[in-house]
Image: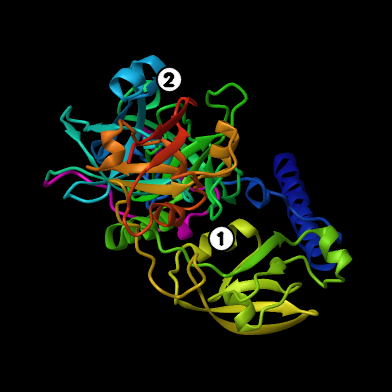
Amino acid sequence: MNGKKILGTIFTAILGGLIAVFVFSLFINEPEGLTAVTPNDTPFVKFTNLPANYNADQFNFTYAAENTVHAVVHVKTLTERRFYSRNPLYEWFYGEPDRRRAEPLLGFGSGVIISSDGYIVTNHHVIEDSDQIEVTLNDKRSFKVKLVGLDPSTDIALLKVDEKNLPYIRFGNSDELRLGEWVLAVGNPFNLTSTVTAGIVSAKGRNLGILSDRYKVESFIQTDAALNRGNSGGALVNIKGELVGINSAIISPTGGYAGNSFAIPVNIVKKVIDDLKEFGTVQRAILGVEITDVTDELAKEFDLDKIEGVYIANVTEGGAAENSGLKTGDIILAINGVNMNSGSELTENLSKYRPNDKVKILIKRGNKRKQFEVVLRNMKGTTNVVRPDELILGGKFVELTDKDKTRFGIDYGVKITELGEGKLKDLGLGRGVIITSINKNEIKRIGDIRNSLGSGKSLNSIEGVQPNGTLFSYEFKR
């Protein structure tokens, strides 16, 4: 009996406890503000599994590298520096100046094959003043090349080899390059052929002030792909293996790579080589303005409502801009819908057009926007196609740049760029020689040569400067 009473008491106690808990849960509310926290609710925790659509090869450079190296050539140049000394006694007996030739100078660079029939692009500064040019392909074949044309204002030269079915690089679109995009630089630094380096696009539209031509176009692509001496003229390609630039320069306190390299945008290159092929010279479209970037100081000075565009500091009298209604003080905002925010962007954009092309220019005048249609002109102030000068005395010439004038300490002259059969070659004058006087007349422009020769094209005297700085002077008996 006692056992049954004890079990009954325990059962009654358990039942009572359960009833009490049930009643408590029904009538007593959970305290406000208290929530259960689990690890899955923490916002900073992310899963680290690889998703099914992950592409491990999305930044693989092997395709672009392998398809580019075969189309990048090693450019070798030879320049014969001729030295002349005056010997009156020698000239009295033989009628000619005493001549002696120095050792040839060798130069090296890179080039890019752009078509299967042998057209090659390189830098103007790679082949400038050279007497012989040779290229070596990645498969060790070597070819003598013909100089098709050159353009100092963009630092581009076009070469040609007589060969078919060559590997080449297809053109990309440099306008579509984005900051941070991966690119490869391919060339021959220090004569180490077929060298590939990688980097990203660090900036666009850089103006370095390294070209001295009057109509220079500087709007470089800046990257951190390693370049060194010998890389000039090589290829800058995207990860698809498309050509987006021609490597040209570095900024360096020592001459070696220091983290910044620069390439000419391929959209500029395409226009230059098309002109050289079709016309033999570049068709430069001139707007007829002097420009400067819009800065904070300039915006305050002229009470501008926004820092944007390119400021017109001066308008050339009778030029394309003035004839279309543009004025000094106008701010160019866009050309054919493309925004302009720096002088380098404007010159790059205009370099893609030819004389007689019509462009729509959006400007801001007194903080009001207006649009003008402008017919671009050539360097001579007309809308005609510019043709290269024919051979004069067996040579072709270019006017001196500021760099040439400083280097040789002269104020004027024209430089021989190409040489065929004729009087200049007979005299032993070569490419790079500067002519300063013909028939006692100063030669400041190419047209001065014709004027000095007269209708009979007789050459009585000629003076100038050799590439090594030596002065020369010839007089001929009538």
Q: Amino acid at mark 2?
A: Arg
Q: Residues within 10 Å of mark 1 (few under 14, many from 20)?
A: many
Give the image quarter of residue 108.
top left
**Which of the pair 197/412 is nearer the observer?**
412
**What residue lies at 43% left-to-right and 20% top-to-bottom?**
86
30 is higher (above) or lower (below) than 109: below
Judge left or right: residue 94 versus residue 47.
Answer: left
Find out whether residue 185 is within the magenta segment. Answer: yes
Indicate the position of residue 312 as horizontal and vertical percent values.
71, 68
Give the image quarter of residue 68.
top left
Q: Which residue is mark 1?
A: 347
Secondary element under disc 1, as helix, strand or loop, is helix
Visible in this render: residue 286? yes
Query: Closer to the camera: disc 2 or disc 1?
Result: 2
For the N terminus, which image quadrant?
top right
435 is higher (above) or lower (below) than 79: below
Secondary element under disc 2, as helix, strand or loop, is loop
Judge left or right: residue 363 versus residue 83.
Answer: right
Indicate the position of residue 7 as horizontal and vertical percent values.
71, 44
Which secondary structure class fits the magenta region best? loop
Q: Which residue is mark 2?
A: 86
Range covered by the magenta-colored residues: 164-187
**Which of the pair 449/283 is nearer the observer?**
449
Visible in this render: residue 238? no
Q: Residues within 10 Å of mark 2 (few under 14, many from 20)?
A: some
**What residue lies at 71% left-to-right and 40% top-to-bottom?**
3
Q: Amino acid at mark 1?
A: Thr
Give the image quarter of residue 198.
top left
